[in-house]
Amino acid sequence: MSIESHFQRLPLHVAQLIVNHVLHGSGSDLFGGPKPSLKPLLWACRNFRTIVFSQVSGSFKLWLDRHQDQLKSEWRFTPLFYVQTSIPKYRFAKELSLWLDEQSVYSGKILDMLLRESYDVGTFPMVRSILFRFMPLPLPEDGAEVESVDIDSAAAEANFNAFVQHIKLMAPNVSNIKVWGSDDRRYQPFTPSSRFQTLSARLYMLTSHIGFVSTSENLRIDLPLNLIHNVVHVNHDSSECNDQVFSLIRYCAPTLESLALSARSFDDRLASLICADNGAYTTYPRLLTLRISSYSNADSSSEPTFKNAVPFPSLRHLHINKYYTFGDDVLFRGNSTTLKSLQLVLSPFAVDLLTRHKVFTPTSHLNLQIVKVKHITGLIERSFHAAADNYMRFVLMIGPNAVVRDIGSRKTADDFHGIQPDTHLLLRSALSLFAEHPWINVLALSDTRLELWDGFNIIKSLPLLTDLHTDGITFGEMPHDVTANELPAYVVTTYGSASERFRCWHIIDYRTGGYEILASCVLLLALVCPSFSYFAHPYSLRKQIYDPIVNLSKSARFEPFMPRLERLFSRWQH
């Protein structure tokens, strides 16, 4: 039997293992180089094609060109999809964006164009998310012809209903709808018609996920609540969150499982998430994920309190990318045993409040596995003065069993050109406290260019550490009375077997010190960390760093230690 026949008869689970190995296995370049080609596999077996195509991440865009009176398209896929196939690529898209205007819906133009271009039933079988971007109409002087439509007529109603129904048929498996109202200086300001909210509501009814995105000050979410049912997810990303947004969220509270809010400023409105205008508290019994993000550093002029309210009893993931501006511990009530991941930005006010309410103790939040905490620049000086260890004790008490920790600072606009001095104070304090948290697997020190010697101390303090993330790495000063030729022996003598598990140091900026310094750091780390392989970077460093590593390993200073480096070079060769 030929090898081709064997391939054709491969079970699905075996094909899955082979594809996973090609994509993620040891055959990949440790320095981020190109993956082995999948193209030969695609034509070897139908199961290979099924698996590979299921992992394609792509988007398809359709937009109405008013000037040329036609529907145009554009597609983008991951590099994984650079293969030849007779199947139209848009059939593998998982995201669809449709740029149109209201008039084209009520007049029937957009539906006619979709049908004319054969975007018919089942055209997008893999699409899970659709973004409707409603554009303003062209300015009269642009010469684009825009039909006049009576939006209250029976014909407009029929076209409106037919369009919504066709979207469901065209993408039968859609699970996420987003509506975006966009401004464009080339066009008239986008002003929704009196029917726009009904149109949005009907589109949202196609799914249990509501996504609302807006760059338009004229667009307000004010959906007829009687048309909204069984909403599971709400994602609001706009310049502001108005009262109608919070009314919708509270209305959906019984069924919501995830909620994401992002705005330039909330202007004290976050209290509306928990308390309605009549003073009644809202409970979200099924909410698992809450994300709140703001671009403003000073959202609140008051800190509301909520006596006896327990709004999020089932919360598993709480991510707050803004200052904590509630006046009590309301977000943490009733979920100390359910929280799995937490992201916080700490101000002096937040540290004092959370400490006063005893939110985090050595025996609370024991199921927290991922903790990301950023402090406001200068917090150490303003709040704790020189006692950085007090702050670190507080931070490490947040989820005492967490295996992934991200500790850093949130910079202001004036801070982006330098590393904050209090970061190093925190590091010195952390080293003395890590012994109490030996189970940390992944540690991120944001906004820090760590010295190699501090890295050694961290790795030795955390025996289960596998990955370390920093902005960069510097060599630092040479140890006292140690020459460059004596350095490998010094590292081996001082740090011994620092860690059997540490494998990767992730950096963003590799320019400090240059490739020669990085090569030296790789070899020194490999001497005392047998599993260490490389510095991970968003861009491959293989070509730049490989030759310096090989040349340096052959030098007199490293040659006596080649047996310790054999595992490193063995991994590179595979």
Image (tube, grey):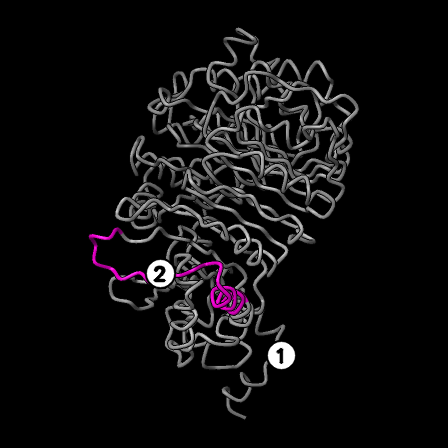
Residue 519 vs 109, above or below: the answer is above
> What residue is at 75 percent from the left and 29 percent from the top?
280
Is any atom of residue 183 visible in this view? yes
Among the two numbered marks 2 and 1 on one chain, the one whose residue lies closer to the N terminus: 1
Q: How far across and down, in percent of the image, does residue 314 sit?
A: 75, 40
In the rendered image, which quarter is residue 489 located in?
top left
The residue stretch that appears in magenta: 139-164
Q: Are marks 2 and 1 in contact (CB under 8 Å)?
A: no
Judge by depth and name the residue closer to the eye, 8 or 68.
Answer: 68
Which residue sits at x=38%, y=62%? 76
**Left or right position of 565 against 315:** left
Residue 207, numbered circle: none
Image quadrant assignment for residue 478: top left
The foreground one among 287 and 42 is 287
> Helix, strand, or loop for circle 2?
loop
Q: Give the total number of marks visible in the rendering.
A: 2
Question: Which quarter of the image is occupied by the C terminus?
Answer: bottom left
Report the mark closest to the observer, 2 or 1: 2
Residue placed farthest to the bottom in the image?
1
In the depicted structure, whether residue 119 falls above or below residue 396: below
The label number, if any, that marks residue 11 in the structure image = 1
- For residue 465: magenta? no
Q: Amino acid at mark 1?
A: Pro
Q: Is residue 455 above or below residue 58?
A: above
Relative to 101, is 458 above or below?
above
Q: Is residue 386 left or right of residue 551?
A: right
The image quadrant where one finds the N terminus is: bottom right
Asked where in the image residue 472 lies, by quadrant, the reply is top left
Secondary structure, mark 1, is: loop
Mark 1, other Cα within 10 Å: few <14 / some 14–19 / many ≥20: few
Look at mark 2 in the image and give the residue it sits on: 148
Where does the image place residue 373, in percent across and percent down from the top left? 57, 28
